[in-house]
Image (spheres, grey):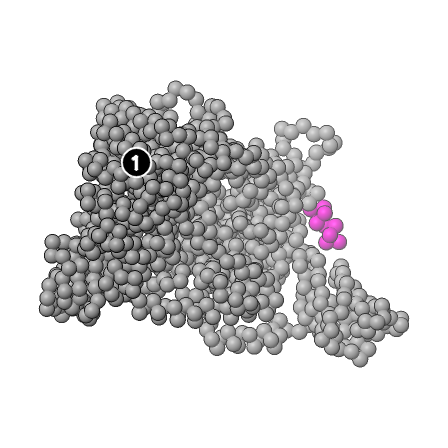
């Protein structure tokens, strides 16, 4: 009878849903259902903060008419008694690709210009894209989302850096799009990923995507002011959609910060799709004021039974598995608003189990419900009709048999726009559970679990599993199983009825035809094993174990950010790099992050005293040419990428930072790569291990940019070799052309006339105005001469030739031009244009009066630059003091930071290193590396950390083994290699 009622109800609802009053109909007589439906005697969660017991929900024509304890029920009302049931608002997924086919990748081969006319110059910017042009309602996917409790989804087309508009769709399988589409333009979507449908090369990096977005916003403002006569449909759409919800898919904590940085530059507050690792820098995330759309794609444990494979697993990966489920709780506790999404899940069914896990880890049920209802509704500007069960809202609600955030709770129905979608028949009695029964003298254990509407069973007898088949209909259970004797193909058949949810009774038909009375008693929910597990857990701790978050949240991170100290080193050999030279048996006092005093017999009542007898203290090593601690290095999509900056892509979790500190390095210049003649801007950073990316950058950092010459930029080793330039003379022409354009741009800007802001030209104009310095990748003397002549032509100087392995041939001209040389100590013959390199290069340039530095361009060599400097003592007879300046004071001069670092002088930053031995010796170890008075590396602390890391890994391995022993899914261990960049890495 109940099934007939539901079919009738759906049929009646369908008339009003299908029949738009202006649509023609060939279906015969049209009937409009204007009746009410009342759901009575239910526990109703009107909103996450309002629950009414024994209440009534009254709906009509897909909307909520009334809700409460004393609802007036009209005469023409169908009443449904929901005694013992609970009603919740249905969930909203703010970030999906529902109903949209995956974009298809275009062909291979480079493309340097746009493929479209009338649109923006870059194919990856497509704000004009309307998701409804690609939308097709998918009932199968909708049903899958119904089962998870979702009634509304916001969908978009996932292609491009700017992806166009999204739409809000009701998951109503019994309507057409005229009713399902609640709002065809709800949001504008962004990402750092290129369109797969275009082969246009630019951008080829995250920093390129960031630069593209910035330039696009400048162009949109210029276009909106009426300064462009030609029509640009992309910019028109971008401006038209700017008041919509702006959603940015970041996918990680670092990218979330980068997206917010772009938005802040244009007063845009993005709603950002996170990556689940926001807990690593919770204060930074909070400071963005962004609402996070939060995936809950938690990792499964690694299979660590093989100890050799387990040993290759990084601590960061192990921590991610353990810490990710705590992320929603930590966001909630820190007042960071978020909504939950199924985005990123390979199998959407895992959404429910992952949500339960987040709640198990401390996320409150109220916050969980807010994240699925009121928060997404508010972000969409639909709080008046979505997210709650208040009068006037859409009749989107869930009917359950209890608390929806409990694992045992069943979701019976998901009503969307007043239309029911049945998940599991609520009229059925709950037969889930464990039963024991006796039959023909044998003991049996029966487990029944109902997955949606399909019950599953496990039957054992004498610890032997028996094959079973089960069906359940109209309160009657039919169970067939094989006998315990496997040699006989005999079956026992049971027909039983459920009694008060606690027992099954009926009859059993044995293989010989005999019938026996059947009775099975349901056990309590907690088996002895489960009780024991809970007892163990409560004895250890009430809260689930969470591995400690460190700064950075990888091996060797700090549990608390270290602070500046007052330190007094006694009786050291001090290499001042100043006129005082090398001072024996001397003290140095560090206070307030600065070098306070240098002298003998110093004292300070507040200082921590360190005996440095027999040890050496130097200024921290400075690497003029590094590519560590960055998420990307090259933007090679165009022959000039002056608009990009490495400051956008600093990776504050790079282990190379710690390794460099262990080698006495305190400052580095992270250079753009050498994929193009005019590369991107540099980042000059201090290696403040554990600090956030933005806090690593020097205050008032000098402005640098990377240029490049030679094989890399003319693409000698490129497979396609199709981009200009393709010759050394073409490289020169690139420089002349771009500086000519920059000069004209700068003149227009200074004239006071209106001009289109061009980030690339702004940067190149800074070079012409002597506000930005060039560090140029160089090898061959002819090209070195060429670039100095180009600089002379435009009246500026090249600051540094880096690599400069033929510098010894043009040292006199370098001195006359005023350019420094940052070179390798003894690299040669790794490619053709290095064939003439000699290890005397540094000494020859130095003797000619050129400021010389030794750099690394390599994550490994940068950890032993002290030894690289020592080679110049052997090759060229450079003095020890001057050789030491090659990696300290001289790179500081080249980077224009020598007023702060590079030597030990009162008033300079306390960036110092305590060495166990002569700093140029192969036996020397950096015992302490200090930056601005903060000890970021301590060799004794390092030993302690190694032991602590072993213990933590052991604890996490034991937890993973427990998961595997419980039968939970695991993943194989895959060793991950750090991607290390150098100048010849062209991707």
Front in this rendered view, residue 755 or 456:
755
* Left or right side of 138 for 520: right
Is 454 rendered above or below residue 711?
Answer: below
Q: Quadrant of residue 526?
A: bottom right
Identify which residue is drawn at 81% across, 71% down. 486
Task: Residue 4: say if magenta.
Answer: yes
Identify which residue is drawn at 44% across, 25% down. 232
Asked if residue 820 shows in the view, the reply is: yes
Q: Quadrant of residue 676?
A: top left
Is 774 rendered above or below residue 746?
Answer: below
Front in this rendered view, residue 201 or 832:
832
Label 1 residue SS: helix
Q: How many marks?
A: 1
Asked if residue 188 shows in the view, the reply is: no
Task: Residue 539: say if magenta.
Answer: no
Tell me the quadrant of the picture where the C terminus can be found.
top left
Across and down, in percent, residue 532 comes to 56, 77
Tell me the quadrant of the picture where the N terminus can be found.
bottom right
Which span is picked out in magenta? Answer: 1-9
Across and down, in percent, residue 197 comes to 54, 34
Seen as rendered, the residue at the extreme right is 513
* Left or right side of 634 for 879: left
Q: Does the magenta stretch mainly form a helix, a strand or a loop?
A: helix
Identify which residue is drawn at 63% across, 33% down. 20
Residue receiving disc 1: 781
Front in this rendered view, residue 916 or 440:
916
Is 290 rendered above or below residue 951?
Answer: above
Across and down, in percent, residue 584 comes to 14, 65
């Amino acid at each position: 009878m109940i099934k007939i009622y539901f079919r009738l109800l759906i049929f009646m609802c369908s008339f009003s849903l299908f029949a738009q009053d202006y649509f023609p109909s060939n279906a015969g007589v049209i009937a409009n259902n204007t009746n009410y439906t009342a759901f009575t005697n239910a526990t109703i969660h009107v909103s996450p903060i309002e629950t009414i017991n024994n209440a009534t929900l009254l709906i009509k024509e897909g909307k909520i008419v009334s809700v409460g304890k004393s609802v007036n029920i009209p005469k023409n009302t169908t009443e449904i008694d929901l005694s013992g049931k609970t009603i919740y608002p249905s969930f909203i997924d703010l970030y999906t690709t529902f109903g949209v086919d995956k974009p298809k990748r275009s062909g291979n081969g480079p493309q340097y210009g746009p493929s479209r006319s009338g649109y923006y110059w870059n194919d990856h910017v497509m704000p004009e894209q309307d998701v409804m042009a690609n939308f097709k309602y998918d009932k199968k996917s909708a049903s899958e989302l119904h089962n998870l409790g979702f009634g509304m989804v916001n969908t978009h087309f996932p292609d491009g850096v700017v992806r166009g508009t999204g739409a809000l769709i009701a998951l109503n399988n019994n309507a057409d799009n005229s009713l399902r589409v609640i709002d065809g333009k709800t949001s504008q979507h962004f990402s750092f990923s290129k369109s797969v449908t275009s082969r246009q090369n630019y951008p080829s990096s995250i920093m390129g995507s960031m630069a593209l977005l910035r330039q696009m916003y400048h162009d949109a403002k210029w276009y909106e002011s009426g300064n462009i006569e030609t029509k640009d449909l992309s910019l028109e759409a971008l401006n038209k959609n700017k008041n919509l919800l702006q959603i940015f898919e970041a996918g990680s904590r670092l990218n979330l910060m980068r997206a917010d940085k772009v938005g802040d530059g244009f007063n845009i507050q993005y709603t950002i799709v996170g990556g689940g690792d926001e807990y690593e820098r919770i204060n930074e995330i909070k400071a963005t004021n962004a609402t996070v759309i939060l995936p809950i794609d938690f990792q499964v444990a690694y299979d660590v039974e093989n100890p050799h494979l387990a040993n290759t697993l990084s601590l960061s990966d192990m921590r991610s598995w353990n810490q990710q489920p705590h992320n929603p709780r930590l966001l909630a506790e820190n007042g960071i608003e978020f909504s939950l999404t199924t985005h990123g899940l390979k199998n959407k069914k895992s959404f429910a189990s992952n949500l339960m896990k987040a709640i198990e880890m401390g996320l409150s049920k109220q916050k969980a419900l807010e994240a699925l209802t009121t928060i997404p509704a508010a972000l969409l500007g639909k709080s008046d009709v979505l997210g709650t069960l208040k009068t006037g809202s859409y009749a989107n609600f869930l009917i359950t048999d209890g608390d929806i955030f409990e694992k045992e709770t069943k979701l019976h129905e998901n009503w969307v726009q007043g239309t029911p979608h049945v998940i599991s028949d609520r009229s059925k009695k709950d037969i889930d559970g464990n039963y024991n029964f006796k039959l023909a003298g044998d003991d049996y254990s029966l487990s029944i679990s109902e997955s949606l509407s399909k019950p599953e069973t496990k039957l054992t007898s004498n610890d032997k599993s028996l094959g079973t088949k089960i069906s359940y209909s109209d309160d009657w259970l039919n169970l067939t199983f094989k006998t315990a004797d496997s040699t006989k193909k005999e079956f026992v058949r049971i027909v039983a009825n459920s009694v008060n949810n606690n027992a099954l009774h009926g009859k059993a038909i044995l293989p010989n035809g005999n019938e026996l009375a059947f009775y099975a008693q349901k056990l309590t929910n907690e088996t002895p094993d489960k009780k024991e597990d809970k007892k163990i857990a409560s004895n250890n701790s009430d809260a689930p174990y969470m591995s400690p978050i460190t700064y950075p949240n990888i091996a060797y991170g700090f549990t608390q950010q270290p602070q500046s100290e007052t330190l007094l080193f006694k009786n050291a050999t001090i290499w001042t790099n100043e006129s005082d030279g090398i001072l024996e048996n001397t003290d140095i006092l560090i206070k307030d992050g600065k070098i306070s005093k240098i002298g003998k017999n110093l004292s300070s009542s507040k200082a921590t005293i360190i005996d440095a007898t027999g040890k050496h203290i130097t200024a921290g090593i400075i690497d003029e040419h590094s590519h560590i601690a960055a998420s990307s290095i090259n933007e090679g999509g165009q022959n000039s990428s002056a608009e990009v900056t490495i400051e956008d892509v600093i990776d504050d979790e790079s282990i190379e930072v710690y390794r460099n500190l262990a080698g006495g390095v305190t400052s580095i210049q992270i250079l753009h790569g050498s994929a193009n003649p005019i590369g991107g801007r540099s980042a000059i950073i201090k290696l403040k291990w554990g600090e956030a990316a933005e806090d690593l950058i020097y205050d008032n950092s000098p402005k640098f940019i990377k240029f490049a010459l030679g094989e890399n930029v003319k693409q000698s080793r490129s497979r396609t070799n199709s981009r200009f330039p393709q010759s050394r003379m073409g490289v020169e022409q690139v420089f002349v052309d771009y500086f000519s354009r920059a000069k004209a741009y700068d003149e227009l800007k200074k004239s006071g006339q209106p001009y289109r802001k061009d980030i690339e030209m702004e940067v190149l104009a800074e070079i012409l105005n002597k506000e930005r310095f060039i560090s140029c990748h160089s090898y061959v003397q002819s090209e070195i001469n060429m670039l100095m002549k180009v600089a002379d032509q435009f009246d500026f100087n090249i600051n540094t030739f880096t690599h400069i392995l033929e510098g010894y041939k043009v040292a006199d001209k370098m001195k006359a031009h005023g350019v420094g040389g940052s070179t390798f100590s003894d690299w040669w013959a790794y490619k053709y244009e290095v064939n003439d390199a000699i290890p005397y290069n540094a000494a020859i340039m130095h003797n000619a009066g050129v400021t010389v530095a030794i750099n690394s361009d390599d994550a490994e060599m940068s950890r032993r630059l002290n030894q690289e400097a020592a080679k110049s003592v052997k090759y060229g007879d450079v003095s020890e003091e001057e050789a030491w300046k090659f990696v300290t004071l001289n790179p500081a001069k080249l980077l224009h930071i020598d007023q702060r670092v590079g030597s030990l002088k009162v008033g300079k930053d306390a960036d110092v290193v305590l060495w166990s031995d002569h700093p140029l010796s192969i036996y020397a170890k950096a015992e302490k590396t200090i930056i601005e008075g903060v000890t970021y590396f301590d060799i004794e602390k390092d030993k302690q950390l190694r032991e602590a890391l072993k213990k933590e890994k052991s604890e996490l391995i034991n937890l993973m083994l427990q998961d595997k022993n419980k039968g939970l899914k695991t993943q194989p261990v895959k060793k991950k290699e750090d991607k290390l960049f150098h100048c010849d890495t062209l991707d």
